[in-house]
Amino acid sequence: MATVQFRKLQKANGPIARIRRRFGPWATFFRQFVKHPAMIGSVIPSSSMLVEAMLAPIDWSNTRLFVEYGPGVGTFTRPILTKMRSDAMLIAIDTNADFVRYLSADISDHRFRAVHGSAADVRAIIADHGFTQADYILSGLPFSTLPEGTGAAIMTETHAALRPGGSFLVYQYSRFVEKMLSPLFPTVTSDLEWLNIPPCRMFWATRENALAQAA
Ligand SMILES: C[S@@+](CC[C@H](N)C(=O)[O-])C[C@H]1O[C@@H](n2cnc3c(N)ncnc32)[C@H](O)[C@@H]1O
């Protein structure tokens, strides 16, 4: 009996288990890329430098609802949960059921919900969780390869789902998304993160605030 338990412990800490733990999320991500290249849009997950640069401007103390589109294996999801208030909520939406199952099994946090669905239905999804508007929405979606019309529908829904003054944060390998953001959002700032494979464009688009809306 003791020998069986010792072997199990050896297996759990052995080299193969360590490699699986280290590369597990990457292998899951790559398998999904091979199955759905246009929907995933990238061969490997984002770098930690991209995650930190993208999340740097966020005002966490005033964030009650954060929504993430296309979380994949959770590269952004875990750092968001680390930074978020204890009474805030993170809703991650992905069309890929395998990613949603993976995240639901891997992340145990009362502030986190993984939803199998499309970003195009964000308002209905946040309403199901008792919210009318989000403070921030982060997108890892490959806008340039999404099916015809999907990107435009997501933009309109996202704008409507954000509170006045709320921001839509987008990371992309091209400038494609910029021309979709600027007609809807009065302020769009951008930057480039070189320390990512490939280097990645970052956009922070902010909705008009309540005073501007009333004027
Ligand atoms: C480039 S991956 C982003 C992965 C991860 N966020 C990262 O930074 O490594 C794009 C993700 O968007 C998801 N996706 C594609 N279309 C979607 C849609 N309409 N709504 C929600 N998720 C979608 C894909 O399933 C995939 O998980």
Image (cartoon, helix red, strand yellow):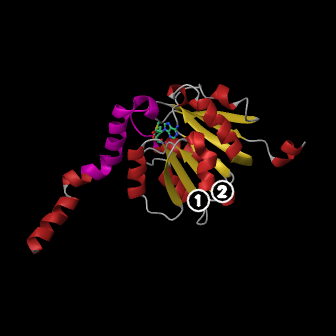
Q: Characterize the local packing of mark 1: few (<14), some (14-19) or many (20 or more) Cα atoms within 10 angstroms.
A: many
Drawn side of residue 16 relative to residue 57, left or right: left
SS for callout 2:
loop
Extreme-right residue of the structure? 215
Q: Amino acid at mark 1?
A: Met
**Camera-nearest residue between 96 and 4:** 96
Residue 194 to residue 125: above or below = above
Rendered residue at 36%/38% (across/down): 32
Sequence-first tag of 2 and 1: 1
Residue 115 locus on image (x, y percent): 50, 51
Whether residues under marks 2 and 1 lie with C-beta atoms below 8 angstroms apart, the answer is yes
Residue 42 drawn in magenta: yes
Look at the image and tell me in which quarter the C terminus lies: top right
Rendered residue at 45%/33% (across/down): 39
Residue 151 to residue 110: above or below = above
Residue 132 locus on image (x, y percent): 69, 53
Rendered residue at 60%/63% (across/down): 85
Question: For residue 131, which numbered disc appears in the image?
Answer: 2
Residue 175 locus on image (x, y percent): 59, 26
Query: Residue 184's image quarter?
Result: top right
Q: Which residues are magenta?
A: 19-47
Residue 139 drawn in magenta: no
Drawn side of residue 60 relative to residue 102, left or right: right
Main secondary structure of the magenta stretch: helix
Q: Amino acid at mark 2?
A: Phe
Q: Characterize the local packing of mark 2: few (<14), some (14-19) or many (20 or more) Cα atoms within 10 angstroms.
A: some
**Camera-nearest residue between 9 and 163:** 163
Q: Nearer the viewer, mark 2 or mark 1?
A: 2
* Residue wearing tag 1: 89
